[in-house]
Amino acid sequence: MSIHSPYSKVVSRFNESEYARKRILVITKTICIVGCGKMGSALLSQWIDGPEAITVVDPAGSEVPEGVSLVADRAEIADRRFDCIVAAVKPQLIDDILADYAGNLAPGGYVLSIAAGYSAVRLSKLMGDAPVIRTMPNLPAAIGRGVSGICPGPHATSAHTGHAENFMRRAGSTITVDSEDKLDRVTAVAGSGPGYVFEIARAYAEAAMAQGFDEDEARDMVLGTIGGAIAMASEPSAASLEDLRNSVTSKGGTTAAGLAALNGDGGLSTRLHDTLQAAYDRAVELR
């Protein structure tokens, strides 16, 4: 398992040597994104800075950035070949849609799937034994701060994986795993994670409002506090999360009192454990 994070001095978003980076980029020159919903659009906003020529197939006619070709259906691309086909449709639509694109994959190309719950083995067979890599991004990819799990599937080469990692790093940090089961666990932690954080922030702001602050004041204080704490914890020289917590907790002080109410009985830790397990269990059900 390898992790690449934009918050480390050692590992940057583009940490390959210049030669290796160019070598990876030239392998895949043409991209076809099938479907362009919320996640596909989020990734596209970050991918457009690369050297690839991108075509989007979307019958809904989603808006795409300047320089991206948009077509309504597969008939409009006819027999064109692409070095990478991105499966960005809902998992339940893959069987009906993606098989038609098998002939549009160029020799040596690969399929990059962002669809949760649809296995790489199934997708490879559907696409004529094509090389497949699954990735599980999360919504902050829209602002280049996503966390994406990457799992090489059947027939994927190191060149395919290298391009996929480079591609996804444009939208944030990546973690490469060696099994789809591990990718389901990444889904539980990171893929669904923004939802947990937004819910925690919502409840935190609601509690602040109960202390007499209006909605805007509560939101500003809560998001500022969360953002500052995360930035501090993300510093390369930052202490452990436990040590950081202890550094703001004086014995008998206000923080200690608050923490005792928050997790003194371990209830918060248990609830978060149960949250990740439930998300993982659901990911397994969707395979």
Image (tube, rainbow, N blue to C red):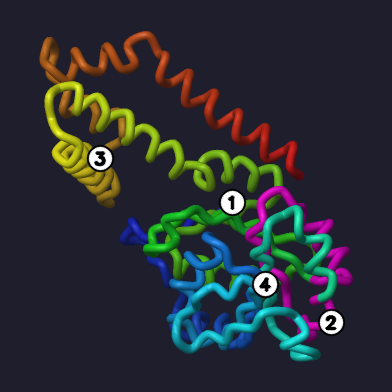
Report x, y in % for residue 42: 47, 65
**Sequence-earlier tag: 4 or 2:** 4
Q: Reply above or below: 50 against 149.
A: below
Tell me the mark number nearer the camera, choosing from 4 and 2.
Answer: 4
Tell me the mark number nearer the camera, choosing from 1 and 3.
Answer: 3
Q: CA distance from mark 1 to mark 2?
A: 33 Å
Q: Which mark is residue 1?
A: 1
**Sequence-earlier tag: 1 or 3:** 1
Q: Which residue is mark 3?
A: 226
Task: Pick the residue in front: 203 or 248.
Answer: 203
Residue at 68% over, 66% down: 87
Task: Give residue 248's quadrant in the image.
Answer: top left
Q: Secondary structure at mark 3?
A: helix
**Three-letter amino acid code of the residue under disc 3:** Ile
**Sequence-earlier tag: 3 or 4:** 4
**Three-letter amino acid code of the residue under disc 2:** Gly
Residue 106 on the magenta span: yes
Q: Are marks 4 and 1 in contact (CB under 8 Å)?
A: no
Relative placement, left or right, of 285 versus 279 is right
**Sequence-earlier tag: 4 or 1:** 1
**Three-letter amino acid code of the residue under disc 4:** Val
For the residue carrying disc 3, how many other residues have a C-alpha within 10 Å: few (<14), some (14-19), or many (20+)?
A: some
Q: CA distance from mark 3 to mark 4?
A: 36 Å
Magenta stretch: give its range: 101-130
**In which quadrant of the rendered image does the C terminus lie?**
top right
**Three-letter amino acid code of the residue under disc 1:** Met
Q: Are marks 3 and 4 in contact (CB under 8 Å)?
A: no
**Sequence-earlier tag: 2 or 3:** 2
Q: Which residue is mark 2?
A: 103
